[in-house]
Image (cartoon, rainbow, N blue to C red):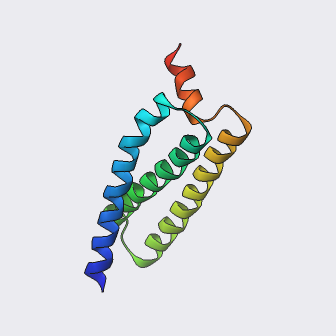
Amino acid sequence: GSSKAASLHWTGERAVSVLLLGLLPAAYLCPGPAVDYSLAAALTLHGHWGLGQVITDYVHGDVPIKVANAGLYVLSALTFAGLCHFNYQDVGICKAVAMLWSL
């Protein structure tokens, strides 16, 4: 039970990392809404899992862990919503990065 779930989680983390490696050149070569929203989802999930590991390593006690995890879910939801809002209402992630590179 538990080891199978951990194995699936590990596989999912690696899949998202490989997806991000593919999305970075895609963002440069063919920027657009599909890549923007894929980046928003993949970056949010990657950050969520990474910060979840920080919580696992450094937060101890039942109540602090529950509070930290709740805060992480709120932060991740706000991050994804903010990136989607940026993609929809502004230039999008791909074009924004291209604009930064052109400075």
Q: Residue at x 34, y 68 (%)?
A: 9
Please indicate whether residue 7 sits to the left or right of residue 31 in the image.
left
Instruction: Give above or below for 92 relative to 5.
Output: above
Whole-percent x and y of residue 101?
A: 49, 19
**Viewer-nearest residue: 60 or 73:** 73
Q: Residue at x 65, y 52 (%)?
A: 81
Which residue sits furthest bottom?
Answer: 1
Instruction: Give above or below for 28 relative to 41.
Output: above
Which residue sits furthest front?
Answer: 30
Q: Residue at x 58, y 28 (%)?
A: 96
**Viewer-nearest residue: 93 or 78:** 93
Whole-percent x and y of residue 73?
A: 54, 63
Which residue sits furthest top?
Answer: 103
Whole-percent x and y of residue 46?
A: 42, 53
Instruction: Give above or below for 63 relative to 15.
Output: below
Please indicate whether residue 63 sits to the left or right of residue 36 in the image.
left
Instruction: Give above or below for 1 relative to 39.
Output: below
**Viewer-nearest residue: 37 or 75:** 37
Total of numbered circles in the picture?
A: 0
Q: Quadrant of residue 4?
A: bottom left
